[in-house]
Amino acid sequence: MRPDIKICGLKTPEAVDRAAACGASHIGFIFFEKSPRNIEPDIAGTLADRVRGQVKSVAVTVDADNDDLDEIIALMRPDILQFHGHESPERLLTVKAVTGLPIMKAFSIRDADDLRRIEPYIGIADRFLFDAKPPVGSDLPGGNGVTFDWRLLRSLDDSVDYMLSGGLNKANIAEALRETGARAIDVSSGVESATGVKDLQMMDEFFAAVAEASRAQPVSGSVK
């Protein structure tokens, strides 16, 4: 069974259409001014409308305040909210109660201690996203094109639903799935010809690599 596939950091109609045509389960739009993939909520909403009902749209934020979230939700109408900052469990509980939307909480991983930080969020986040810690000097919490030691995820209880991210590309996705058995994956820089520029051929090649890897190493588990 093929994992969920999220293409993140989309900015153009062509990339959105190709992601949907390839069979993406999720598309992500980034609302973080420092990111080269940053997008305005109204534009993200127009792009999401192209595949609404076919692909789940994800609003990716970093320590967004209530006003920013209100604007994103009103203009984009996301299916899922992804939090990639220092949001507390209490903050996520409040957002879930107010918006009624599913929550994905991202964590940057380098060692086992980083993975333990998810414990207070279990039962609150509907799904986790595990990314690599950014390189020294990077202002971006994600989308840096670096990986982490996937073997760390073997310690997780099977009930922990997560999306694997961080430096995934067509060359390493088979190993990533083999090492983790991840039921969901997230790719951004791995399908870009330049920072923030999605490459349609690279997207095709990534999906083909996932399909081949899934046939060789079936991935099991339910999807959300």
Image (tube, helix red, strand yellow):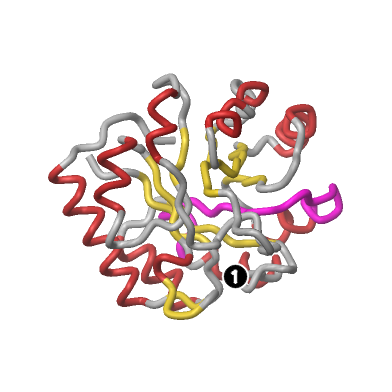
Q: Quadrant of residue 102?
A: top right
- The picture places residue 194, in percent across and down from the top left corner, at 48, 80
Q: Is residue 104 above or below residue 134?
A: above
In the picture, the quarter occupied by the N terminus is top left
Q: Is residue 30 left or right of residue 130?
A: right
Q: Is residue 115 left or right of residue 136?
A: left
Is residue 58 within the magenta segment?
yes
Query: Which span is picked out in magenta?
Result: 51-70
Front residue of this view, candidates 119 and 28: 119
- The picture places residue 164, in percent across and down from the top left corner, at 44, 44
Q: Quadrant of residue 191?
A: bottom left
In the picture, the quarter occupied by the C terminus is top left
Question: Which residue is pictured at 73% across the width and 28% down the height?
Answer: 89
Q: Which residue is mark 1?
A: 46
Q: Residues within 10 Å of mark 1 (few under 14, many from 20)?
A: some
Is residue 109 within the magenta segment?
no
- The picture places residue 45, in percent across and down from the top left corner, at 62, 65
Q: Is residue 218 above or below residue 135?
A: above
Front residue of this view, candidates 2 and 84: 84
Question: Which residue is pictured at 35% across the width and 38% down the height?
Answer: 182
Q: Is residue 37 above or below residue 5?
A: below
Q: Is residue 119 above or below residue 218?
A: above
Q: Check disc 1 and give the amino acid type.
A: Thr
Question: Which residue is pictured at 77% across the width and 51% down the height?
Answer: 69
- The picture places residue 127, in percent across and down from the top left corner, at 53, 34
Q: Secondary structure at mark 1?
A: helix
Question: Which residue is pictured at 65% across the width and 55% down the height?
Answer: 141
